[in-house]
Amino acid sequence: MEEKIEIMNLLQSKQVLEHELQSLVYGSVEIRENESNKYIYVHYREDGVALTKYVGEYSDELYNLVLNNSIKAKQLKKKIREIIKKLKQLNYTEEELSEKVEQNIDFAKRHLVDTIYKQAILEGVATTFADTESIIEGGKVNNMTSEDILKIVNLKHAWEFILNKNVILSDTNFALLCEINKMVEEGFYYTAGKVRNTPVTIGGTTWKPDLPIESVIKEELEEIFSKELDDIDRAIELLLYTMKKQVFIDGNKRTAVIYSNHYLISKGKGIIAIPVELTEEFKDLLIPYYEGRDEKEIKKFMKSKMGSIPADISEKLPSAIYLKEKHYMSI
């Protein structure tokens, strides 16, 4: 069991490092001149293929950033090689995803903009679908705060992380929960991904969550996984538990949605997203759930709004029908 946990932690660490590496612009620097202007290009190799990438118009700041990124990239690659070596020593062999899970991942990627837009609205981010799409695709938007833009960018990074093959094959455990929050809250709190040690309040209620204790959280998560529940019910339990527990200083709803989706996607059972038109109703039901007055109504609400999820998701359907009837759990 200990060896399995070590392998899982190594795989998750490897994915975090690879994600960080992919976010860097680095390589051998070339400066090209055109009349009075200078431009920076980088040369690098990807899967053995030599590539060249335009970085931007020359400035000392950009030039030094690329140089520093190249140093950092070497360090990250070294760490990745060390992890691969450790995995070999543990006789780890990469598992293959089932066709159902691969299709679920593909489905989640195709509807990523819509899913993130709904998460942003749940969080109170002042965005539109078009602006969300533009941010995710690296474009510019007007009339949005830098804080709201960063929240959407962070959601994109967290989703890309959990949709990675190695991460999908990992357990939906406490370590993963922390890593998701770290990505969701990157740039906001230096304690992102760490169990909070200060009290928090919840809007709309006088109820206050207890200070979370790591060992207790792990035990309670284990209890959820040991219950005799189908995959959809378990995903709902994970989502609601994580929201109510308020494990982190901020970003708990965003973290909970992505965390529960990791579990559901790993089972090939769809994705969870809260439709914009049901956001306020969902929030209203959260209050009595938090207070312990009514824990059944919100689960009933979620189940009734989700529709049926087929055991076999390989059926080829038009995207709109697939979204509405087959594989998009709207809660």
Image (tube, rainbow, N blue to C red):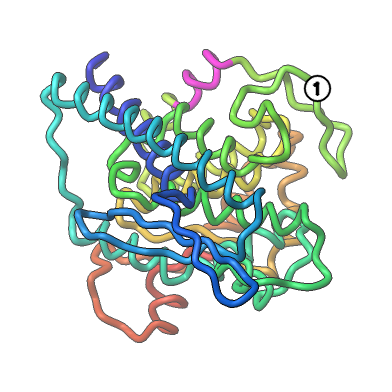
In-front residue for pair 50/46: 50
Q: Amino acid at mark 1?
A: Pro
- Answer above or below: position of 138 versus 42: below
Image quadrant where residue 9 sits:
top left
Main secondary structure of the magenta stretch: helix
- Answer above or below: position of 308 versus 200: below
Question: Which residue is depicted at the point 62% across and 47% down?
Answer: 254
Percent position (x, y) of residue 214?
56, 16
Work out whether residue 305 can be spotted: no
Q: Which residue is mark 1?
A: 199
Is residue 216 covered in magenta?
yes
Percent position (x, y) of residue 118?
63, 64
- Answer above or below: position of 24 versus 74: below
Q: Is residue 78 toward the left or the right of residue 302 in the image?
A: left
Question: Which residue is depicted at the point 14% across and 25% down?
Answer: 88
Q: Quadrant of the N terminus?
A: top left
- Answer above or below: position of 132 versus 26: below
Q: Is residue 102 toward the left or the right of residue 66 in the image?
A: left
The part of the chain drawn in magenta is 214-221
Q: Residues within 10 Å of mark 1 (few under 14, many from 20)?
A: few
Question: Which residue is depicted at the point 40% across and 49% down?
Answer: 27
Work out whether residue 55 can be spotted: yes
Percent position (x, y) of residue 14?
34, 34
In-front residue for pair 292/135: 135
Number of numbered discs on residues: 1
Is residue 181 covered in magenta?
no
Classify mark 1: helix, strand or loop: loop
Percent position (x, y) of residue 141?
73, 72
Residue at the outermost front position: 35
Question: Which residue is depicted at the point 80% across and 22% down?
Answer: 199
